[in-house]
Amino acid sequence: MDIQDYLRILRTRWPIVITTTVLAVLVVLASAMVTTNMYQSSTRVFVYPQSRVASYAQLLNGGVAVERTLERLNLPMSKTELSSKITSRIVGGTMLVRVTVEDTDPDRAQAIANTVSEEGIALARELEKPDITTSPQQDTDSEASAPLGVSGPQPTLGFDASGTLIEPTPRVTLETPATAPTKIPTDTIANIPLAAVVGLLLGLALAVLRDRMDKTIKDSSAIEGLAGTDVVGAIPSDSELDGIVAFTQANSNSESAQEYRRLSANLQYRKSESHPRVTLFTTPRSNEGRDSTAANTALALAEAGHNVCLVEADLRSPTLARIFAVSNDVGLSDVLAGQIPLDAVQKTTEFERLTLVPAGPVASNPSHLLGSPATRTALDTLRAHFDYVVISAAPQLPVADATVLSALADGVLIVVSYGVTRRDDLARASAYLRTIGATILGVVVAAASEKVDAIAAENRDNHNVPADLASRS
């Protein structure tokens, strides 16, 4: 995939990207709304000597101290749950240990902080047994050198009977009682940009995955590979068009109208032994742009000064009579059934040099009528009286109508709809036409992307379509 493919995916799959991004942000906001507020309270415990600080920090964070706190406060939680609420850390390189408790109840957080500190201190005193001897003078000196904020006799260095220096007596005291509980700030606002970025990346990934799983045609090289022929026309989506006709006075200079002019020039000036005068337009399936493409190509040929007959050969669900506002009381089905002569069903339209042969009443056996000798006779008659005959046939795969007619036409244009026609349908339709020896003139892509349009323009050049005629308005 190149950058153009990613841009195309972004243009066509942008709802997925936007939706995923919005959902990610909403999840963060919803999480913040349902998250219970947490409160924090801390104590500070003084430990002497410093060699004992790390051990007592662990003692204050679990074990017996936690069990005694549970019993003393009669808390509705397990020992593991209570331990998860308590954190004890050494303050810098000092002999102070900060005990922090987080809880959804501010008063309970403060009570746990005080109680676990008190129980930890009591446990430390139980575990340590004084084994030093000191003199009254040493006690006096010890008290005189007490750390700032700590009163009473202080531990000092002791000596045994042989005069050997021994470890001082450990001392653990509550230096600062539990502070007033404070609400722990959440990072909801800070998380919104991160959620947006994550949602955007996830949306892009989903869009690419969705595109890879899409079986419809979107790539010009894939279209040409499946059909075995060139993309000779690319009609863009044009929101300015009023209905199906691109050549009304209001929109004759629209982008779509210009593309139809290029397609008609392609038919007139193809690099071949003879240009097709009777051209069949068909699609693999219904609702893929056949009627609009055939009608507007006929209009472009008429605008170029040719006498054109547009024939609606879809005898099952006709629409062109309604589009051109002519009567469909009689039409091609009546002619093929031998009920009415051909010239009696040729209807003039509001467009100069364009004649319409409507389908007529819906026939019960369209394939039989179209396969009769009367069809060849009718097309030969129209060929003799008009410069170009444009036939709009039924979809090829559901019924055999287009296959029958393709053998009588000079060439066939397969119309596909960008992002609608399935790749396997295009391959099957092309194979059917080749089986009966039909001349496939190319593929016309309706609602095409810029990339497909560029390939179509290159193919027009390869067919030696004069630039002035292809762009003439």
Image: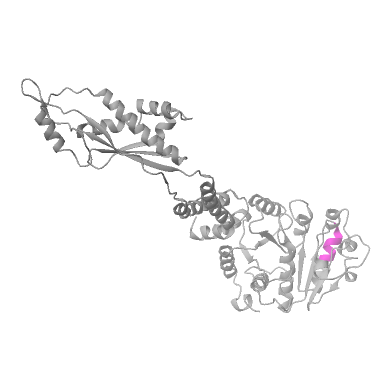
Q: Nearer the viewer, residue 301 or 102?
A: 102
The way the protein has been coloured in the rendering is one colour
- Work out which quarter of the rendered image holds the C terminus and state it: bottom right
In the picture, residue 39 is in which quadrant?
top left
Q: Nearer the viewer, residue 147 or 18?
A: 147
**Residue 225: where, in percent of width, then height?**
59, 55
Does the magenta segment cover residue 410?
A: no
Compared to 195, does 291 lie above or below?
A: below
Range of the magenta residues?
372-379
Q: Residue at x 25, y 43 (%)?
A: 92
Which residue is outermost to the right?
A: 339
Q: Residue at x 71, y 66 (%)?
A: 293
Horizontal placement of 350 versus 101: left or right? right
| Residue 356 visible in the snapshot | yes
Compared to 280, does 255 lie above or below?
A: below
Q: Nearer the viewer, residue 311 or 288?
A: 288
**Residue 152: where, in percent of width, then height?**
20, 34
**Residue 423: where, in percent of width, then height?**
63, 52
Horizontal placement of 302 versus 129: left or right? right
Compared to 55, does 380 lie above or below?
A: below
Horizontal placement of 32 versus 433: left or right? left
Q: How many marks?
A: 0
Does the magenta segment cover residue 378?
A: yes
In the picture, residue 85 is in which quadrant?
top left
Which residue is outermost to the top?
A: 161
| Residue 63 visible in the snapshot | no
**Residue 417: where, in percent of width, then height?**
67, 59
In the picture, residue 11 is in which quadrant?
bottom right
